[in-house]
Image (tube, helix red, strand yellow):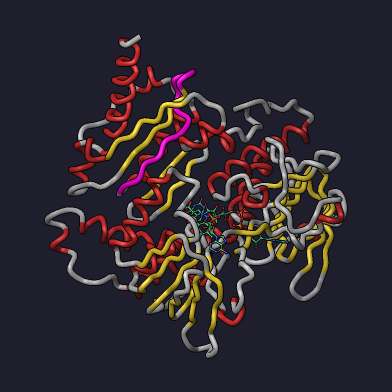
Amino acid sequence: MDGTREDQGNGTYDVVVLGAGPVGQNVADRARAAGLTVAVVERELVGGECSYWACVPSKALLRPVIAVADARRVDGARQAVTGRLDTAAVFARRNYFVSGWDDTGQAEWVKSVGADLFRGHGRLDGPRRVTVTRDDGARHTLTARHAVAVATGSRPLLPGIEGIEEARPWTNRQGTDSGTVPGRLAIVGGGGVGIEMATLWQGLGSQVTLIVRHGLIPRMEPFAGELVARGLTEAGADVRTGVQVTGLRRPDPAGPVTVTLDDGSEVEVDEVMFATGRTPATDDIGLDSVGLAPGTWLDVDTTCLVRGVDGAWLYALGDVNHRALLTHQGKYQARTAGDAIAARAAGRPLDDGPWGDHATTADQHAVPQVFFTDPEAAAVGLTSEQAVRAGHRVKTVDTDFNAAQGADLHADHYQGHARMVVDLDREVLLGVTFVGPGVSELLHSATIAVAGEVPLKRLRHAVACFPTVSEIWLVLLAAYFRDRDRDRDRG
Ligand SMILES: Cc1cc2nc3c(=O)[nH]c(=O)nc-3n(C[C@H](O)[C@H](O)[C@H](O)COP(=O)(O)OP(=O)(O)OC[C@H]3O[C@@H](n4cnc5c(N)ncnc54)[C@H](O)[C@@H]3O)c2cc1C
Ligand SMILES: NC(=O)c1ccc[n+]([C@@H]2O[C@H](COP(=O)([O-])OP(=O)(O)OC[C@H]3O[C@@H](n4cnc5c(N)ncnc54)[C@H](O)[C@@H]3O)[C@@H](O)[C@H]2O)c1
């Protein structure tokens, strides 16, 4: 174990954090900043899935693919992009960003904030107690005076399809740490992992077949999935929607995989990847010792306190609480819960009403997300359908991006679409979706408008610079007020 205080003290800390992914690290930092003593338990790499097999390596690999695609959209620059991607250089770039899968730097960071790091598998052992089992079997017990924060993340969920074990499928792990490009790659699942992996591996030279049982990225507005599917098809991928995998065969472990679909067709590939969702890493963390069911997502209140456990000491943050499986949202929960833990420990009153310092209100109203595909898909808040289902009186405003001159200057014949969903009763935004090249950097303006509940009457005074892609705001707002004024004139 890296922990030092185990040798000096009795293993008692104010806060014990289970899992040192981005979320565990953030809650540890926040609790330390409030003057609490903190132990962090990690069984694999400090930095978690996000740093080594998810967000960071996938974006490091995607960026060169998108940079080339962006250059090809600009006449004059297009002519300069004549070669293929240098895959060895792309993999080297990825390896740099994951520090060669060495967590020394991140472990040092944990120590630098004054937390003690314990390496090993952590399990709850009744209220406020955690046992840590090292790889060599040695065990250590930690006691938490105030809080245990579970931030153990999630793992890939593989469906029980015949032949799946024999096929030895890739998951996000191989999809982000492979150093070779499969000639033919089938990807099953049309969520974030599926579409980003399809963009990435098609861009690196694989012939990708994306197999999706419904539409792509169904949690966003329907046009987002349609435009991403079109982009993938234009890049050469074979996008098949409305089909399911019924079986897999790989008789020769070193040979190809045959994927059978429910429309009767078969696809032969060199590797198959499953991107069919996640399951919580809570099956072996001692939940039964505190009366909770192992293997379940942990239900939490607005301060991320787990419901159904007496004594206000068990918190669940990040993927494990299933509120939004996103690093930035988990880190927001960690900051908020870290402050709530400190307030409870000091006996201070909580500010846990909507938008209070100890409330994760944005989890319900303003979760932003970007898919780094080509085109990029970015959204915050509710879709039009979700807003109607939630009972709001809604006006949906749509426009193509080429209505903004800045977009056309950014990319020749810029292809993209934007939608804002207006709450007619309060005249504020409930949700915004942008799809197009480079829209990832535009999203935060929408997040501020949605989380800030900025009245549209005021938002129209937020002037976008000429000629930028942000001028899309002028187009959307002008369309909204034109329709509103017309409707008012008609009485
Ligand atoms: C391919 C892919 C790409 C993604 N891209 C993005 C993106 O671009 N942006 C984004 O916001 N999100 C992205 N996500 C989602 C993001 O990775 C997760 O939301 C994020 O990793 C959650 O952080 P976490 O700290 O909750 O869990 P994790 O990052 O999974 O960390 C959990 C840590 O807990 C440790 N642990 C588990 N059990 C125990 C135990 N019993 N004892 C000790 N330690 C334990 C694990 O070893 C791990 O280090 C992506 C996901 C995937 C799969
Ligand atoms: N850039 C980002 O922010 C980013 C990137 C990747 C992943 N993520 C997040 O990570 C989490 C996990 O992503 P994911 O894509 O693995 O999960 P997901 O739940 O978003 O998508 C999984 C998809 O697989 C499909 N599916 C499930 N079982 C299937 C089966 N048996 N056959 C065919 N299809 C099946 C589902 O219908 C769904 O569309 C998500 O919350 C996602 O938002 C974020």
Q: Is residue 469 above or below residue 190?
A: above
Q: Residue 466: image x %, image y %?
A: 21, 32
Magenta stretch: give its range.
424-436
Of residues 126 and 279, the one drawn nearer to the viewer in this rendering:
279
Of residues 13 and 73, the one drawn nearer to the viewer in this rendering:
73
Q: Main secondary structure of the magenta part?
A: strand
Left-right relation of 282 to 236: right
Of residues 283 and 246, the one drawn nearer to the viewer in this rendering:
246
Q: How many marks?
A: 0
Quarter of the N terminus within the rendering:
bottom right
Work out whether residue 443 can be spotted. yes
Tell me what residue is drawn at x 44 percent, y 54 percent: 216
Tell me what residue is drawn at x 73 percent, y 58 percent: 282
Q: Is residue 90 above or below residue 257?
A: above
Q: Residue 344: image x %, image y %?
A: 76, 33
Work out whether residue 8 can be spotted. no
Left-right relation of 290 to 192: right
**To which quarter of the image does residue 179 belong?**
bottom left
Of residues 31 and 403, the one drawn nearer to the viewer in this rendering:
403
**To which quarter of the image does residue 449 belong?**
top left
Q: Residue 369: image x %, image y %?
A: 47, 45
Quarter of the C terminus within the rendering:
top left
Q: Is residue 26 magenta?
A: no
Q: Residue 478: image x %, image y %?
A: 28, 24
Tell me what residue is drawn at x 72 percent, y 28 percent: 350
